[in-house]
Image: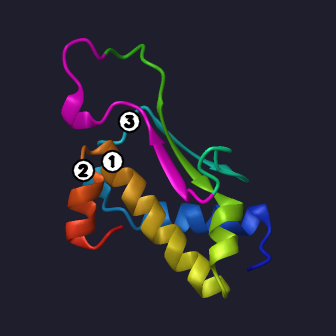
Amino acid sequence: MVDMTREAFERLVSLALDEIPAALTRQMRNVVVLVEDEAPADEPDLLGLYEGTPLTERGDWWAAGSLPDRILIFRNPTLRICQTEQDVAEEVRITVRHEVAHHFGIDDARLHELGWS
């Protein structure tokens, strides 16, 4: 397990988001990315979670007044599976890309095919 402050972990999440191509981030309107210390109790080993309506499923009903989609990155589960800070940085990059992909409608099976799971 790696010992890392929340601030340092949040910085890694921010750096991972900076690596997402600008052409994609411009399409990520009404999305908030948050760091939570723990995953939900029913999935304690979960590293990230996308909550929202993927862009591919939005229709006329999806309006500007909708609540933002949320991407949650879970700090402690990530720190528990990593041995070094470099491991944490890599796992955060993978998790952020994975959850952003869900926002764009890419499911877990396709992510696995792409090597992003």
Query: Distance of mark 2 from mark 1, alpha carbons?
Result: 5 Å
Q: Residues within 10 Å of mark 1 (few under 14, many from 20)?
A: many
Does the magenta-highlighted stretch encompass residue 76?
A: no
Q: Colour scheme in the image?
A: rainbow
Q: Which residue is mark 3?
A: 29
| Foreground pick, 99 / 8 | 99
What residue sits 43% from the left and 31% below the top?
A: 30
Q: Which residue is mark 1?
A: 102
Can residue 23 be seen here? yes
What is the magenta range?
A: 45-62
Mark in the foreground, 2 or 3: 2
Q: Amino acid at mark 3?
A: Arg
Q: Amino acid at mark 2?
A: Ile
Q: Which residue is mark 2?
A: 106
What residue sits 32% from the left and 14% below the top?
A: 63
Q: Residues within 10 Å of mark 3 (few under 14, many from 20)?
A: few
